[in-house]
Image (cartoon, rainbow, N blue to C red):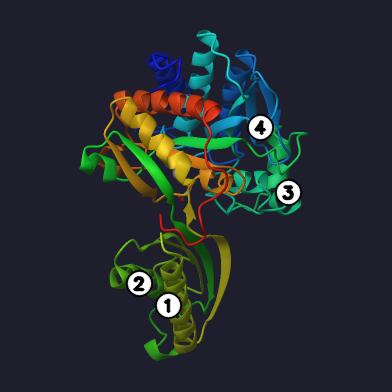
Amino acid sequence: MNHPHGHLRIDGDRLMRRLAELATIGPIDGGGSSRLALTDEDREGRDLVTTWMRDLGLDVRIDGIGNVVATRPGRIDGPAVMTGSHIDTVRSGGRYDGNLGVLAGLEVIETLIDAGVETEHPTAVAFFTDEEGARYPPDMLGSLVYVGGLGLEEALDTEGIDGSVVGDELDRIGYRGPHPCPGPAPRAFVELHIEQGSVLEAGGHTIGAVTGVQGISWTEFTITGQANHAGTTPMDLRHDAGWAAAAIAVHVRDIATRMGGRQVATVGRLDLQPNLVNVVAGTAALTVDLRNTDEALLTEAEADLAAFVDGIAEAEGIQIEARGLARFEPVAFNGSVVDTVAGTAESLGHAVSRMPSGAGHDAQMMARVCPTGMVFVPSRDGISHNPAEYTDPADLVAGANVLLHILLALDNDAFEEGAPEEGETI
Ligand code: GLV
Ligand code: MN
Ligand code: MN
C-alpha cells in the first residue's frame, strides 16, 4: 500500500460493541434481529445509528424516502467517497446482514477523525430504506429511488405485505426527510457486506472482491379457484387453488434443477384460504424468486414458469394472476474499483476471491450512477436471513480495515469512470 496512512487500523472492539447494541433492537430467539422496514423496530435502529452519526459531528441528511447519508467534509467540496448498506432486516434476520456495512462505514469515519486524517474528498456513510424488500417490494427500494430508478411518489405509494403504505409509515416513524431524491452521485461507492453464502469459507478466503450482482426476478401469483368440500367433491370437478400453488412450487424447483449452473429458484411465501383440513383451497397466493448471473438464462427461466402457470390455470379451470414485484438485470461492478478492492485486500495480507454476489445489494443500484464495488467477508456455513448468521469477529474487523483502505485509495487515486460494458460477465 503506497498511501501515507497505510498503518491505520479501525477499532475492532468499538465495531463489535456497536453491532451488538444494534442487534438488541427487535431481538429474536437465537441472537438475531427482526427490524422490517419502517416498523417501530426500524425506527429505533435508525434513531440509534443517527445518534452515533451526529455524535461524530457528521452532517446527517435524510431524503424523501428515508435514506440517511452522513458526511464528513474533505479538503475540497464535491462528490463524496461513499460507503454504506442497510439496517432493515428480514423477519428472521441475523445481526450482520446490512448492519455490518453501515457500522463499519461509521467506524472507518471515526477512525479517520480520531487519527486526524483529512481526506481530499468528503467521506460519507449511508443507510438506505427497505433494502430487504421483505415488507415493501422491490428490494433495494431506497437506493433505487436514490439513483432515480424509481420516482419518489411511486415509491411512497408502495403497499406492503400487511396493507400498510410506505409514505404513511415513513411519516409515522418520522423519517420522511427534506433532502431531494434522486440524491447526489458520489465520487465512488463501496459496500462491505457478509457473503451470505459459503464460497469464501469453502475456498479458505477472508475477503471477496465482488465482481457484480446476479439478476433477480420476483413475481407474486394470486390463484382463484373454488372452495369446496374435501370429502364430497370428485377429483375431476375441483378447481383447487392449493394444488395449483403446490404444482407451481414444485415446478419452480424443477426449473432450477433442469437449468443447473447458477440458476436458483425459491417459493418463500405461500398462503392458502381458507386453510382448513377439510376444505379445497379457494384461493392461494405465493411468491417466486428466480435469480441468475446471466440475463438470457434468467429470461428463459421466467418464460418457462409463465408457460407452466398458463397450462395449469387452463387444466384446473382456475384463474392465476401474476404481479411483478421486482426485476433487476445482473449488474457488473466497475473493473477499476474491483481491482482496488482485490489489491487493497491483498496488500493487507488477505487471501482474496473474485466472485459474484448471490444476494441483492444497494451497491447494485449505486453502480448506475458512480464507480462501484463491494467487499465480502465469510459467512459461517453460508447461513443468512436466519438468526444463526455468523461471521468470525476477526473477519468482520478484517473487512472493515479493507474498507478503510479502499476508501482512502478511492479518495486519492485515479480510477476508470463509468460502468463496465453492457453484457460483461460477472
Ligand atoms: C435482498 O437483499 C435479497 O437478496 O433478497
Ligand atoms: Mn443485505
Ligand atoms: Mn438481506
Tell me which numbered mark, 4 or 3, is placed earlier along the sequence: 4
Q: Earlier in the sequence, mark 4 or mark 1?
A: 4
Pick the front one: 154 or 242 = 154
Q: What residue type is labelled 3?
A: Leu
Mark 4 vs mark 3, CA separation in Å: 22 Å
Query: Which mark sits nearer the N-terminus, 2 or 3?
Result: 3
The picture places residue 377, in percent across and down from the top left corner, at 35, 35
Q: Residues at badges 2 and 1 in contact (C-beta under 8 Å)?
A: yes
Q: Which circle marks residue 135 in the picture?
A: none
Residue carrying label 4:
79
**Residue 193 visible to an observer of this rendering:** no
Mark 2, secondary structure of its residue: helix
**Residue type, label 1:** Asp
Do tag 4 and tag 1 residues touch (Cβ < 8 Å)? no
Residue identified by numbered label 1: 304
Q: Is residue 235 left or right of residue 257?
A: right
Check mark 4 vs ligand 2: CB closer than 8 Å? yes or no: no
Query: Mark 2 vs ligand 1: CB under 8 Å?
Result: no
Label whose residue precedes the other's in the sequence (2 or 1)? 2
Residue of label 2: 255
* 3D distance between C-alphas at marks 4 and 1: 44 Å
Q: Where is residue 71 in the image (x, y as percent from the top left)?
A: 64, 24
- Residue carrying label 3: 152
Mark 4 to mark 2 CA distance (whole Å) = 44 Å
Taking 288 as reference, is 253 left or right?
Answer: left
Quadrant in which the C terminus appears: bottom left
The nearer-to-camera label among 4 and 2 is 4
Label 1 element class = helix
Assess disc 2: are there few (<14), some (14-19) or many (≥20) residues with their C-alpha within 10 Å of its C-alpha.
some
Decide: few, some or many residues near mark 4? Use Cα within 10 Å; few <14, some 14-19, many ≥20: some
